[in-house]
Image: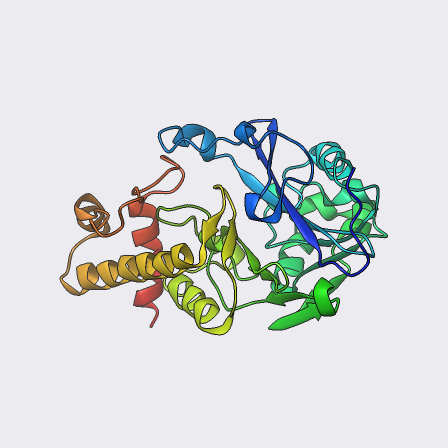
Amino acid sequence: MRTPQPDEPIAAVGCIAEHGVAATNQLESLGNMSGADSRDVATDDDDRSRREAFEQTLHALSRAGVTLVDTKLPGYGPMLLERIKTVTNKPVTRIINTHSHSDHTGGNAFFGPTVESIVHENAKKSLAADPSYAGERAKFLPTRTYKDKLTVGSGKDQIDIYHFGRGHTDGDSFIVFPALRIMHVGDMFAWKAIPYIDASAGGSVVEHPKSLARAVATVKNVDTIINGHIPVSTWNDLKEYAEFTKDFVAFAEAAMKAGKSVDQAAAEYKVAPKYKDYVVTIAEGFVTPKGNLQMAYDEMKKK
């Protein structure tokens, strides 16, 4: 086991789970710290059915302990801890959740109520309304919230947490590790396809690209993006995704202005050729052009 030196920055290991199969993504630019075989990670572009179920978790090791960004579905806590122990014997001292959905918060309770847990204030409201946190389990609700930006740690251990507006939900966080030039974006950029927008949790098709644009304009000096449900991407990928979602909203606006029904618009929607690595959806039956267009139409009618 490699022991970090006192003056070195936090190190990160991304852990991916898909259909119950755990794999560790070593973020090769940071070095192979755990010795796991990076070939375990499913990266075949043709194998999208496996990639749909990725919930990407980031482990950040500092001198004080381990910060965990997202904890996957309920039941994954022991697996996460096992993976962390391949890197360090230090305890998990902090959890940061990118948003409120259970595939990103489900393992929180495993680490106990004494671990500091951070979410956006709107995400905590969503979690507090979830029956899973009723009664005695309310002790597992996040212990700390923020509104626009929160910084924890300092120097090489600094972590910046941002909220840029509505998108996937109304409580999405962008978590930046400046010393590593890494940002975890959760499901604000889950995959290279139309996004899953949870309107019941305050999400917005129309506001999503605006929030992504604010992230691109505000955050500096990031190279690597940790996505919600695919292997890592780049800063340029994030910029491209912001444009992709903006184009989708522009398509919806033009279709509605032309008097087209949602069904007509959905039948006509295609991914523009300039988005070479994109598909319409990687979650057929769950995320569809029709569903997102209906949400966009409903939002625009309220303006």
Q: For residue 180, what is the image quadrant?
A: bottom right
Please name the residue shown 60% across and 62% down the image: 176
Please name the residue shown 22% across and 52% down the image: 274
Q: Is residue 86 above or below residue 253?
A: above
Please name the residue shown 27% across and 60% down the image: 247
Quarter of the picture holding the C terminus: bottom left
Please name the residue shown 44% across and 73% down the image: 217
198 relative to 72 in the view: left or right: left
- Image location of residue 144, percent across then percent down: 75, 63
> Residue 17 or 169: which is nearer the viewer?
17
- Image location of residue 233, percent across then percent down: 45, 49
Q: For residue 211, what is the image quadrant?
A: bottom left
> Residue 138 or 50: which is nearer the viewer?
50
Q: Is residue 13 above or below residue 161?
A: above
The answer to whether residue 104 of the structure is visible from this angle is yes
Q: For residue 16, what is the image quadrant?
A: top right
281 relative to 102 in the view: left or right: left
Q: Is residue 175 above or below residue 56?
A: below
- Image location of residue 156, percent across then percent down: 71, 65
